[in-house]
Structures are given as C-alpha cells and as structure tokens.
Amino acid sequence: MTQSMKETSSNKNASNKISTTQLVYAALFTAILAICSWISIPSAVPFTMQTFAVFITLSLLGGKLGSLVIFVYILLGDIGVPVFSGFKGGPGALFGTTGGYILGFILTALVYWMITALCGNKLYIRITALLLGLTLCYAFGTIWFMYLYAAVNGPVSVMTALGWCVFPYLIPDFIKLALALFLRGRLYRYIHLS
C-alpha cells in the first residue's frame, strides 16, 4: 500500500470517529432533550418543549451527531430512565399509543441529516428539512396511534386522530421551530465540534 493510500485510509477512519468534544456535546444535548421533555407549558392543550429540543439539537449539532443524540435519548427512555414527558420511561411509555411520535423523532433526524448532507446548510434548506422531518414524525406517530388505539378502543378516523394528536400542536411546534432557528443563529458560532 502506498503512503498516499495509507493517509487517505487513515483520514477516512478519523472522519468516521466521534471526538471527545462531540461526545460531550452529545451528552449535553441528550440532557437538554430530557429536560425539555419535562417542561410542560400550560395552554388549552398543554405541550412540552420536546420538539424544540429536537430542532435545536439538529440545528446546532448537525444531522449525524444530532441523530445520535436523539437515538440515545430514545434508548435511555426505552430502558427505563424517566426522560420522556411527565418523567416517564420504559417500554410502556415508548410503545404506548403516543410513543410513535417519540419514535418519529428518529425520522425527523434522519431526514434532516439526509437533506442537509445532500443540499447544504443554508437557512431555507434547514427549515425545509425540519418541516419535512416533523411532517414524517406526525404521520408515523398518527398511524402508530390509530393502530394501537383501535386495538383497545375500536377504530378511530384519521381526522379524529389528527384532531387529538396533531392539530393542537401545530402552532406551538411552528413557534418552537422558529425559536430553535433564532437561537441557532445566536449560538452556532460557539459550537466547536472538532
């Protein structure tokens, strides 16, 4: 193997490794995700800051590291750490009727990662990626909800499921998205992932 081939190979291996700094950011943002999940904002339909944490994590850490953070957060909740809203954790919380919306965060992250990797990191691309990811999260979560709800209580229409699980959260989620993008603009220069 020639020297240049060895250097190329070692550069590829180095770029695939996660640095200590990235691990620290991953731990920090996993904690932020949990804390935001515990924050409940009172309104006609109370909501948490969980989706805000997903948006800010992806916006600041990027698709690759952000996806890892979201996966670790969900894994922690699945093994029983009370990181979900209402200080819940365990398979019962994750695989219950509304657990599909939590699992849908993985879709949000992967879509964000794919779109920003392919199209760049401009503001309109990030907005599009987050909105598309949120739409897929809503769709997956609603299908999950309808299936599990029907198994216990009987069938429910799509519009009823959307009325219970999605429509009341649209405006708060758009506000959380705008807040995350605003904060990303203020904080991004201080994030050093290398």
Image: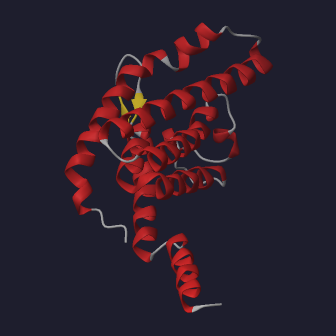
Q: Please name the residue shown 41% across and 29% down the image.
A: 47
Q: Quadrant of residue 37?
A: top left
Q: Could you tell me residue 126's position as x and y percent?
A: 37, 40
Q: Please name the residue shown 23% across and 62% down the image.
A: 190
Q: How many marks?
A: 0
Q: Which of the image's four quarters has the C terminus? A: bottom left
Q: Which of the image's four quarters has the N terminus? A: bottom right
Residue positioned most to the right: 151
Q: Is residue 59 left or right of residue 186?
A: right
Q: Please name the residue shown 58% across and 87% down the image.
A: 6
Along the line of sight, the residue nearer the viewer: 194 or 86: 194
Q: Is residue 45 above or below residue 70?
A: above
Q: Is residue 96 above or below residue 54?
A: above
Can residue 35 be seen from the camera position used here?
Answer: no
Q: Is residue 62 left or right of residue 175?
A: right
Along the line of sight, the residue nearer the viewer: 92 or 135: 135
Q: Please name the residue shown 58% across and 44% down the image.
A: 106
Along the line of sight, the residue nearer the viewer: 128 or 90: 128
Q: Could you tell me residue 86's position as x and y percent?
A: 50, 39
Question: By what rule are the colours in the image chosen?
Answer: secondary structure
Q: Could you tell me residue 75's position as x and y percent?
A: 62, 54
Can residue 149 be seen from the camera position used here?
Answer: yes
Q: Is residue 10 left or right of residue 55?
A: right
Q: Could you tell me residue 164's position as x and y percent?
A: 54, 15
Q: Is residue 109 left or right of residue 156?
A: left
